[in-house]
Amino acid sequence: MSWLQVTLDTDSAVAEKLADALMDLGALSAAIEDAAAGTDAEEPIFGEPGEPVDRMWRTSRILALFDPAQDVALLIAAAASECGVPTPSWQMEEIAEQDWVRATQAQFDPIRISDRLWITPTWHEAPNPDAINLQLDPGLAFGTGSHPTTRLCLQWLDRELQAGESVLDYGCGSGILAIAALKLGAGRALGVDIDPQAVQSSRDNAAQNAVQADFYLPGELPDVETDVVVANILANPLRMLGALLTRHVRVGGRIVLSGILQEQAEEIRTLYQQWFEMDAPVFDDGWTCLSGRKR
Ligand SMILES: C[S@@+](CC[C@H](N)C(=O)[O-])C[C@H]1O[C@@H](n2cnc3c(N)ncnc32)[C@H](O)[C@@H]1O
């Protein structure tokens, strides 16, 4: 079995409409990306939850898959006409059947967080069997260790966490931070996430790593104070959750915040300064990690 993959570049203003029209007319899938992806002209565009993204990259590329039996030229012309735009130029290539599981797995190598902490997919040999190896496969929840914000939080835990401390992972995603904290010597770890799928993934990942952590939806979280609260969420929720996160940190305990773009760092740091003695920010690839000690 093989498929036909069509690539066409179009003005971003019509990209979504055109991709939808292709799907309505029988495309098996249609994805939109920056036409300049992978070049120096690539434009990273980030959105905050609950806020519309206020701009798009200039030209969009639609990647659409078709069954080889379909008349692709006719479908593209029909989709363009439905959107009221001229038929764009396009290229087509045949995609052969392959072992998609193996192809996907090949994209995920072990990730070195520090000399003693690695994140390793379950199908991969641990590069350093003597290190602390967290076994984690990419799944439905955010947090494989490859994103700078996760890495920044893991590096903080690796550097700063004291044996026996309790940790609350707020916005736990895959549970990676809570699980790493336990592997690094935390006495107790809890996690919370608004996404039920993330709570389930966290529980599965904790079992996979043979650690005992408790994961909750926000309404179920016990009224605990911990030594460390780590929240890798994004600037907007961090603005709204400031007082709540602070309540979960014991006096003298520490907070670790990420998901903050470098240009948002000063504002979030100033906000949390009212409760915490804040450290200097740490940056990685445009993202920030803020930490502080509760007064
Ligand atoms: C960027 S991911 C971080 C996942 C993981 N902790 C990591 O560091 O890789 C943020 C997570 O926070 C969750 N989240 C967003 N807003 C939240 C809120 N108000 N309360 C709890 N969880 C939230 C999301 O569902 C998502 O799983």
Image: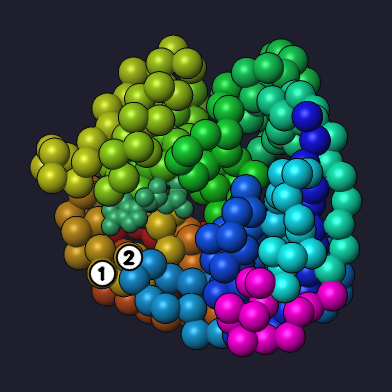
Residue placed most toward the observer, 227 or 12: 12
Q: Is mark 2 within 8 Å of ligand 1?
A: yes
Residue 9 point in image, percent of width and height: 77, 74
Q: For this view, does 151 lie left or right of residue 11?
A: left
* Residue 34 occupies quadrant: bottom right
Determine the residue positioned at 74% across, 65% down: 74
Name above or below for residue 292 compared with residue 16: above
* Residue 225 on image: x %, y %: 19, 43
Quarter of the image with the C terminus is: bottom left
**Residue 218: image location, x then y, percent:** 19, 46
Q: For the residue marked with disc 2, what is the amino acid?
A: Pro
Is residue 121 found inside the magenta-colored segment of the image?
no
Q: Is mark 1 within 8 Å of ligand 1?
A: yes
Residue extent of the magenta highlight: 78-89
Q: Is residue 102 visible?
A: yes
Q: Which mark is residue 63?
A: none
Residue at the disc numbered 1: 240
Q: Quadrant of residue 276?
A: bottom left
- On screen, residue 105 versus residue 233, left or right, reads right
> How is colour applied across the structure in the image?
rainbow
Is residue 160 visible in the rendered image? The answer is: no
Identity, as a three-letter code, of the amino acid under mark 1: Met
Q: Nearer the viewer, residue 280 or 15?
A: 15
Tag 1 and tag 2, C-beta contact below 8 Å: yes
Q: CA distance from mark 1 to mark 2?
A: 5 Å
Which residue: 47% across, 59% down?
258
Q: Alpha-carbon neighbours of circle 1 within 10 Å: few (<14), some, or many (≥20)?
A: few
User: SS for tag 2?
Assistant: helix
Residue beneath disc 2: 237
Residues packed near mark 2 inside 10 Å, few (<14), some (14 to 19) or many (20 plus): some
